[in-house]
């Protein structure tokens, strides 16, 4: 397999183990059908699906890199760090992610109480639980699915506009992992840390510079350039950022569901040929 920038790699998606709607096996089949050559399952703060994903990728004839997406708190905001190519049996990684998941249930109960008190919506916690594959990972996405299906909103974007973002009913801040810790877990387990969908954070140029430089100071080495939530202009912007800082470039759809996701598995344009793809750096960690 040629590991250049033209490779159809999809290194960011989610299964029922976090907040997706498909199993790891279903995702592997969908990715293979859509021409993905190198795949990674990157469930939020969880690596319990990695053995299944490796086996499913092999059965579908795809190469595979282990993955996860870790929630971190940086400058008072939530930022996501994707880890790729790590040892998914590393105890430090397993224990760190378990600690990060801690507190999600309490946060979810507070979200439900806020929705009831401020918007008169009852039963949100129990409603959200119906959409959860792993109760340790109950999230805003599960609340959003409940609110749509219960008729409170037309679609998930409306839920987030009206209820689940800062300053709205249902929003409750959670203290996630520190950037230093998340990058450290990935690095010490033999993987590469990647800043996920940087265009989503609405940072000022100064704040973005601070994120990137601190991330690199802790050993972070990659950035998502082509991803499902980036515009065409942002593909170019973050290609330039990768070149400017000497970061490895990654590509991934951030696929969650056939009904909800903007971009399907494998459907993004390739990385620009001038970039150094993260998968070339991880050639010896690919499961084939």
Image (cartoon, rainbow, N blue to C red):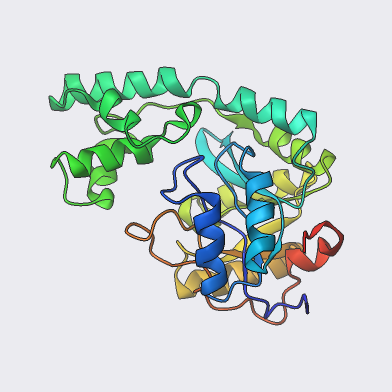
The residue nearer to you, when weighing 141 against 72, is 141
Q: Position of residue 257 (x, y in %)?
A: 39, 55
Query: Is 100 on the left or on the right of 17, as rendered?
Result: right
**The quadrant where residue 7 appears:** bottom right
The residue nearer to you, when weighing 22 against 161, is 22
Q: Position of residue 191 (x, y in %)?
A: 79, 49
Quadrant for the C terminus in the image: bottom right
Task: Tell me which residue sits at (79%, 44%) in the image.
Answer: 217
**The quadrant where residue 55 appears:** bottom right
Q: Position of residue 174 (x, y in %)?
A: 47, 26
Q: Note whether 45 is above or below 23 in the view shown.
A: above
Task: Tell me which residue sits at (28%, 24%) in the image.
Answer: 126
Quadrant for the N terminus in the image: bottom right
Task: Tell me which residue sits at (57%, 60%) in the image.
Answer: 28
Query: Is 203 on the left or on the right of 159, as rendered?
Result: right
Let me know if residue 30 appears in the view.
Answer: yes
Q: Note whether 135 is above or below 184 in the view shown.
A: above
Q: Residue furthest right?
A: 284
Q: Position of residue 11 (x, y in %)?
A: 62, 60
């Amino acid at each position: 397999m040629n590991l250049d920038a033209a490779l159809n790699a999809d290194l960011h998606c989610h299964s029922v183990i976090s907040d997706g709607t498909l199993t790891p096996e279903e995702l592997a089949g969908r990715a293979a059908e859509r021409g993905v050559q190198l795949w990674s399952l990157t469930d939020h703060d969880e690596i319990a699906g990695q053995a299944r994903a490796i086996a499913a990728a092999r059965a579908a004839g795809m190469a595979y890199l282990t993955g996860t997406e870790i929630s971190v708190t940086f400058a008072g905001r939530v930022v996501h760090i994707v880890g790729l190519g790590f040892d998914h049996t590393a105890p430090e990684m397993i224990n760190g992610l378990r600690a990060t998941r801690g507190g999600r249930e309490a946060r979810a109960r507070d979200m439900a109480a806020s929705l009831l008190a401020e918007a008169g919506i009852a039963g949100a916690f129990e409603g959200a639980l119906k959409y959860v594959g792993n109760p340790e990972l109950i999230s805003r996405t599960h609340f959003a699915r409940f609110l749509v299906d219960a008729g409170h909103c037309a679609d998930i974007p409306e839920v987030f506009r009206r209820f689940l973002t800062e300053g709205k009913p249902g929003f409750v801040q959670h203290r996630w992992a520190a950037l230093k810790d998340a990058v450290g877990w990935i690095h010490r387990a033999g993987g590469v840390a990647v800043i996920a969908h940087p265009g989503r954070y609405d940072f000022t140029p100064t704040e973005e510079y601070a994120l990137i430089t601190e991330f690199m100071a802790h050993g972070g080495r990659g950035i998502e350039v082509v991803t499902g939530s980036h515009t065409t202009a942002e593909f170019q912007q973050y290609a330039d950022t990768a070149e400017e800082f000497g970061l490895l470039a990654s590509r991934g759809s951030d696929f969650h569901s056939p009904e909800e996701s903007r971009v399907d598995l494998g459907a993004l344009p390739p990385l620009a040929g001038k970039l150094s793809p993260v998968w070339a750096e991880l050639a010896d960690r690919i499961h084939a």
